[in-house]
Image (cartoon, helix red, strand yellow):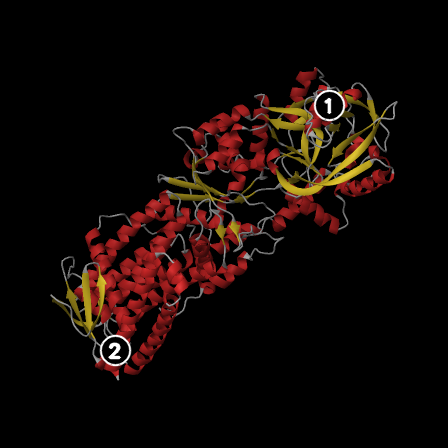
Amino acid sequence: MNIPSKYNSKEVEGKWYEYWMKHNYFHSEVDDREPYTIVIPPPNVTGVLHMGHMLNNTIQDVLIRKARLQGKNACWVPGTDHASIATEAKVVAKLKEQGINKNDLTREEFLEHAWEWKNEYGGIILDQLKKLGASCDWERTSFTMDPALSESVIKVFVDLYNKGLIYRGYRMVNWDPEAKTTLSDEEVIHVEKQGNLYYLEYKIEGSDDKLTIATTRPETIFGDTAICINPNDERFTHLKGKKAIVPLCNRVIPIIEDEYVDVEFGTGCLKVTPAHDENDKVLGDKHNLEVVDIFNDDASLNSFGLHYEGKDRFVVRKEVTKELEEKGFLVKIEVHTNKVGTSERTKAVIEPRLSDQWFLKMEELAKPAIEAVLGEDSDVKLYPKKFENTYRHWMENVRDWNISRQLWWGQQIPAYFYGDGKEDFVVAESREEALVLAKEKTGETTLLASDLRQDEDALDTWFSSWLWPMSVFDGIRNPENEEIKYYYPTNDLVTGPDILFFWVARMIVAGYEYKDERPFENVYLTGLVRDKQRRKMSKSLGNSPDALKLIEDFGADGVRVGLLLSSAAGNDLMFDEALCQQGKGLGNKVWSAFYLTTLWEVSETIEQPASSKLGLEWYKAKFQQVLVEIEDHYSKYRLSDALMAIYKLIYDDFCGWLLEIVKPAYQQPIDIKTYKEVIAIFEDNLKILHPFMPFITEEIWQSIAERAPEEALIIAKYPSVLEFDKELISEFDFAANIVSGIRTIRKEKNIAFKEAIELSVVNTENYTQNFDQVIQKLTNTSVISYVSKKVEGAASFRVKSNEYFVPISLDNIDVEAEIIKLKAELKRAEGFLFGIQKKLSNERFVNNAPEQVITLERKKESDTIAKIETIKNSLVSLQ
């Protein structure tokens, strides 16, 4: 086989991915092996590969490839999430480009466009994951709106409704005016923003009195239905029982009393707008106030906004402020900072809104999930453990989950209305079943299926994905099928901490509700990928590199290593392209090592050198020591540490030491015994590196020898942990320090490697001679002698309690180079001495500096004088 001297990832990666796919290595079927299962956190169907996906899926691929090598039945289920809000927005935007308004379409017509969009663009991110090397079982690819998964979602909704856990309620909800849908509390991000506090004057009916209130939202005055004062606030005693007149719209509203009012905030008076503030709604219910909703679903003002009807709320805020000022109602404006709820998806400012919505009671459902993670014998373990506190906070303060969305893209809520009343509905898995229930409920035997009107809303996307570990194995519709019994519970989940509650906690809740079992054993929470300035990577900041361009530049293996080297669980990764260059560098090093072995001529007649035999014994022991370390890192999900241990083993110990020890002399053959052992060791190295760098390792593995498909590296047998000689490793470390000392002397004295040197050792109390032949080969040392006293005229160094001497002869020194070097050292030393002596001649410094500082400076002076004397003597001996 013609092996190129340089590795080319572009020629290799597509070839081996196609090979793996062709031979079905990624696919899993139920058998008698131990299963190892991961379900992918389904990326949005709208998504394209970004750095977070790269990190998350590389980690999953490392885990799945290692399990496969260990002989487990590895099953990694891929798929995408239908992402109601994001996808509907994309489809609406595309329709708009075509001159089509969503409101002019029927639901069925819109869904045709949505499926068309999904079929055209929805698989992009999964195809991109293949470029990264993700070894998913693509035959099992799922989509949260596949018929079987949708059926599971509807089945669960009906079941929870029949259990009394789902209810319909008229509540204050979070309204996203851009997506025109309600959101759950968890989908609202509270962002600190600088705004204003507007002080407005209200007239008191039937008198000349006025009162001032402070508000951050002057546009909502059109929805005011009361002014509230604190009954204990003596400033407003005279207003009790009176009425106020709302500016501009001149509505007369009562002045009510409630201790809820904070007397310290603003003016101590509160305008009450029950339709647009959750706390105001509570006050409104308590005091039986009128509810006036002033907004359309896009947050423009409706007819209650008078001449502002149809204008956006923020436009109105500016214009109404100007009008209030012109008409004498605006007292003053102050700068005010407060937290503003924004939509996690669209970033729009959330509008509190009263609406009929569907809710899932969470308090009782959450209890098994709390115990599973936080109980004494926790069934589900979070890595890192610090996230248990976050989990506890969310789950112990859980609120009912708003599961309905005012969207068409998603599973339509299976509630069927047969009348105009709020309770005139039934819940069923199909229209036919609903008709039977409606007839029973109403006694109307003439009722037809066409008389039923299905709820227009769709279910929250998370209501699909919380079933993911079960629904991908059809565990909801067919709870006793062989796949759910074999693959569930899954083993590991890899995801980001930002969806610990959105997804992870809810999956645990669903797992205990429907399987009475955890959905997974371990949750590995990755950090966020940030840039060198610690900023979160995002399109808007323009600091997120093109993921596919990185693979193009550094190879998939290089990018994988680059991401993982600095990515400890739960800690943010400061991404720098230099990390990918480092990963690429490791690949090049491994390839160069392999290429070197292809250049050796192998002899079946020569004996194995003692140095090679010893070097191989040492490396096998070192490999086992590192293998134990790697397994410990894996067990604690410290993949970054596992990779670093492998990196050092291969880069330093294998390439840097072992290959130098066994390498034959120039134009000399290598003995066959050493060669075979080196190749066997190399193959073990490839096995432990494969999960991290799958492409280059498979390429080298297949280049070492022709292999049948069943002998591919991807399904090879992972090395077993064996007993190893710790003393041998310790002895080698000692010898390595000696080699480094000799190499330093050669460098300092400009002694070329081809010039043989001698080594004398004084004080051999802690010294073993086992590695003398290795030392001699690696340093071109002709003889090592053991002496009782120091050797004069020699360069020396120490390793522990031993001193080593290398006699220096002018015959093997590059005299000119040594003179140049010594003169440069002399100049530096004389400059340093001048600085010290100048400082010591300064009376002010000597009189004021602490005694220990003066002592230290005087020692520096004497040491430097001695060094200068030594350099001068060396120069005299050379000239």
Q: Residue at x 44, y 45 (%)?
A: 569
The vertical placement of 571 against 855, above or below, is above
Q: Residue at x 53, y 54 (%)?
A: 531
Decide which of 770, 469 is in the foreground and name it: 770
The vertical placement of 710 against 469, above or below, is below
Residue 520: x percent and y percent? Answer: 44, 36
- Where does label 2 land, which residue? 874
Crowding near the residue tagged with mark 1, few <14, some 14–19, many ≥20 C-alpha atoms within 10 Å: some
Which residue is farthest left?
788
Q: Is residue 321 visible?
A: yes
Q: Residue at x 34, y 61 (%)?
A: 854
- Where does label 1 land, which residue? 284
The vertical placement of 509 against 775, above or below, is above
Residue 378: x percent and y percent? Answer: 41, 31
Residue 212: x percent and y percent? Answer: 78, 31
Left or right: where 244 falls relative to 285: right
Decide which of 178, 761 is in the foreground and name it: 761
Decide which of 803, 848 is in the foreground and name it: 848
Which residue is farthest top?
443
The vertical placement of 608 against 188, above or below, is below
**Mark 2 is on which residue type?**
Ser
The residues tagged by marks 1 and 2 sit, at their Cα atoms, a distance apart of 96 Å
Q: Is residue 419 visible?
A: no
Which mark's residue is nearer the viewer, 1 or 2? 2
Q: Quadrant of the C terminus?
A: bottom left
First reached walking from the N terminus: tag 1 or tag 2: 1
